[in-house]
Image (tube, helix red, strand yellow):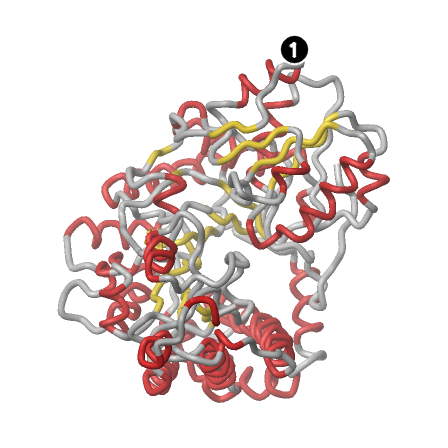
Amino acid sequence: MAKYIPKNEFGLPKSSLPPLGLMGLFNYLKSYYNEIELIDRNVNPTSIEKLIKDADHIYIGGMIAQEKGFLEDAKIVKNAGKLLIAGGTIISEDSPLTELADHLVENEAEMVIDDLLEGIYYGNAEKYYKGMLTHPEKFFQPDYSSINLKNYQSMSVQITRGCPFNCEFCDITARFGKKQRIAPTEHTENAFKQMYNLGWRGSVFIVDDNFIGNPKEAIELLKNLHRIDNEIGYSFPKYSEVSVNLSDDTPTMQELRKWFRKAYFIDNFFGVETNNTEALQETGKNQNLRGKKTIIEKLKLITEETGTSMMMGIIHGFDSDTSDAVEKLIEFINKTHIPTVMVGLLQALPKTELWNRMKKEGRIIENSTGNNTDGTMNFIPYNISEKEAEQNYVKILERIYHESAFFERVKRALRLINPEFKNGSTPMSLKEKLYSASRILTKDNSSTYWKYLKDAHKIARERFGFFSKGYWFIISEYLTYCARYTHMKTQMQIIKEQIKTRIYEQWQLYSWKDYKILQINDTTLN
Ligand code: SF4
């Protein structure tokens, strides 16, 4: 078990979430091995050579964005003569890992793991296993004792897999299906009870692709989470990923919004993507366009009725995006009550409809980095060049994370958020809170944070009365936003530096429209 507890600048654990998939695999494998250990490279600074010294079999898993580190580790493992088994969303038949790993598992592993283990035992395992959609009864169940919980800012649980929607850029439906599969109630119950018994009192991220993919079932899931909290005698603060149709004006959605509050969800992430109607239609995100309300009205309604804080994802680089539309996008973001906005440039991920369309049109230039916030695109955008898209990206970040714009959104959020204040929900001890607050208010941007603290205090006092539970909730939310602001500003600086020094290739200087007009042929693109 990893004992290292690195801290970030606010005295909090450095890693936000534990490796949930590997914790499930660990739980399954432990009955097959005499000795087994789970290593999270995000929190364990020991060299890979030392980590694998006494191991015979190494299982590695991860995502596309981690490919570089993966390949380096895989080479070391193979040079040390160990058996290497690789899995996770990083795996595809044309992945460079194919040359290094002894065995690879693409997609969900549960339905092929027994064949793989038997093959390894008898020495006749296949090179490549293609997993398939798993029956929920067989979902791996994570063992939370396989990690040191103190290394993480939040725990995670998966209850459902899959999403019924058709967003062109998203690989969820290709990987996990359009019909949502729901884990048996006991799986969820076991996870929360084990976390509680291991002493966890912090927040829990429900990592589902879209928690409300099946709205009627989602109501039952929320009721179940509420029941589990009651049985344990502790309400875990929760958050998840949710589609904007939560704002729909239907009895089911009204009921759903009510249960988010009861089940103590304090935050949710929404794929808003853009305010550009044409772009939403182009990418198949029609669920954001339903009804008569504007997107801003929909987002406001969600917070009013669920009480939760919100985060949103924004994407630039759709075919119908232009540089002129950027001003409208910035204005839109700055009119919301959502301080935490994850902006990314559109990337065509493998297995998506977007990848297929770009491939067919001859616009793909390279594989996706798997990280849409690194300020790069892997295909030629339609109305703008890749270089312009990058410059627009920096402009959006600078304007939405400008001090006055950000803290206006914070003030709007603080006036709206209002979860059920649960007894006993104290994710951090008072000592930890005070320590963290003192770090936030004395380090980077501290004069800004003190300046707006007066506003937060005023809002908290007016809404809930001095030193009440609600008052402290608002102040602690304010400090959380400050910490996120520091993080976002740092990230923005890194991206700006990278973009400033980038040397552009020819394909990055023209839009696809230009290419068509100039009739530049494919061979000149690379
Ligand atoms: S709603 Fe979210 S998870 Fe579902 S397809 Fe769209 S982007 Fe993917």
Q: Position of residue 121 (x, y in %)?
A: 66, 13
Q: Is residue 193 visible?
A: yes
Judged left or right of residue 476, residue 264 is: left
Q: Relative to 345, does residue 166 appear above or below in the rendering?
A: above
Can you say which quadrant of the picture contains the N terminus?
Answer: top right
**Quadrant in the picture for residue 287:** bottom left
Q: Relative to 334, does residue 243 appear above or below in the rendering?
A: above
- Residue lying at 55% horizontally and 59% vertically, measured from the top left: 369
Say which residue label 1 marks. 122
Q: Nearer the viewer, residue 230 or 109?
A: 109
Judged left or right of residue 401, residue 483 is: right
**Quadrant in the picture for residue 52:** top right
- Residue lying at 58% horizontally and 77% vertically, measured from the top left: 492
Q: Under tag 1, what secondary structure?
A: helix
Judged left or right of residue 129, residue 362 is: left
Q: Nearer the viewer, residue 53 or 456?
A: 53
Q: Amino acid at mark 1?
A: Tyr
**Quadrant in the picture for residue 511:** bottom left
Q: Is residue 468 visible?
A: no
